Image: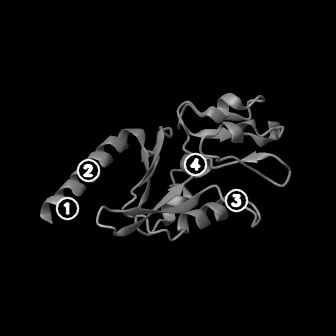
């Protein structure tokens, strides 16, 4: 699936993670680090976490989720940045940054409820940009491209509702067949 229609502008982008399909392989995080030339001593822009869930009959289940910048509609990091380093891209809805104007005050990091912004060796903020350059060229973000189970997807806004409904119907159908 391409996140850009041929011959058209990039439309608003939505990342979607199917928790039932995520196997915690970390391929998304590795692809992100490779795409962004992330140094070994810096936290990746995308990370995979595990949490355990206990049912009423005392069985444990592990769930995994891949987390990166949520590209919030009303992004607190954008509002907190005193220099305008972080901006919303009107075309894609992504939260982008220009760290050449970053003063390293860490206001963005303190404002982000997910603690997403990290700081490079020069004290400048860096974070997931949704693989903006890849999207502009009609390619999927690196993390989505390498997900072996298809748990991580990228949709154009106009595709998302249809895909979400399809996934819900598939889940309901599988429950009925049990």
Q: Are marks 2 and 1 in contact (CB under 8 Å)?
A: no
Q: Which mark is drawn over residue 168?
A: 2
Helix, strand or loop at disc 3? loop
**Residue projecting furthest to the right:** 122
Helix, strand or loop at disc 4? loop
Circle 1 residue: 174
- Residue visible at 61% across and 60% down? 32
- 10 Å neighbourhood of mark 4: few (<14), some, or many (≥20)? many
- Report how many numbered discs are placed on residues in the image: 4
Circle 4 residue: 130
Left or right: 17 as drawn, with respect to 48:
left
Q: Earlier in the sequence, mark 4 or mark 2?
A: 4
Percent from the top left, x then y, of residue 109?
70, 42
Q: Are marks 2 and 3 in contact (CB under 8 Å)?
A: no
Q: Earlier in the sequence, mark 2 or mark 1?
A: 2
For marks 4 and 1, give the one nearer the viewer.
Answer: 1
- Residue visible at 77% across and 42% down? 99
Circle 3 residue: 43
For marks 3 and 4, give the one nearer the viewer.
Answer: 3
Q: Are marks 1 and 3 in contact (CB under 8 Å)?
A: no
Percent from the top left, x then y, of residue 26?
55, 68
Percent from the top left, x then y, of residue 33?
66, 62
Q: Earlier in the sequence, mark 2 or mark 3?
A: 3
Q: CA distance from mark 2 to mark 1?
A: 10 Å
Q: Are marks 4 and 1 in contact (CB under 8 Å)?
A: no
Q: CA distance from mark 4 to mark 2?
A: 25 Å
Q: Earlier in the sequence, mark 3 or mark 4?
A: 3
Q: CA distance from mark 2 to mark 3?
A: 34 Å
């Amino acid at each position: 699936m391409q996140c850009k229609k041929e011959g058209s502008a990039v439309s608003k982008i939505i990342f979607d993670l199917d928790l039932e399909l995520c196997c915690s392989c970390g391929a998304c995080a590795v692809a992100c680090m490779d795409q962004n030339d992330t140094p070994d001593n810096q936290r990746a822009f995308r990370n995979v976490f595990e949490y355990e869930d206990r049912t009423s009959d005392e069985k444990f289940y592990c769930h995994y989720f891949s987390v990166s910048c949520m590209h919030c509609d009303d992004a607190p990091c954008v509002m907190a940045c005193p220099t305008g380093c972080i901006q919303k891209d009107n075309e894609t809805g992504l939260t982008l940054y220009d760290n050449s104007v970053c003063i390293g005050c860490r206001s963005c990091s303190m404002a982000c409820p997910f603690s997403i912004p990290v700081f490079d060796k020069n004290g400048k903020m860096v974070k997931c940009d949704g693989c903006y350059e890849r999207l502009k060229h009609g390619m999927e973000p690196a993390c989505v491209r390498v997900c072996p189970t298809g748990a991580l997807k990228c949709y154009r806004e106009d595709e998302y509702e249809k895909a979400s409904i399809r996934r819900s119907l598939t889940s309901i159908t599988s429950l009925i067949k049990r």
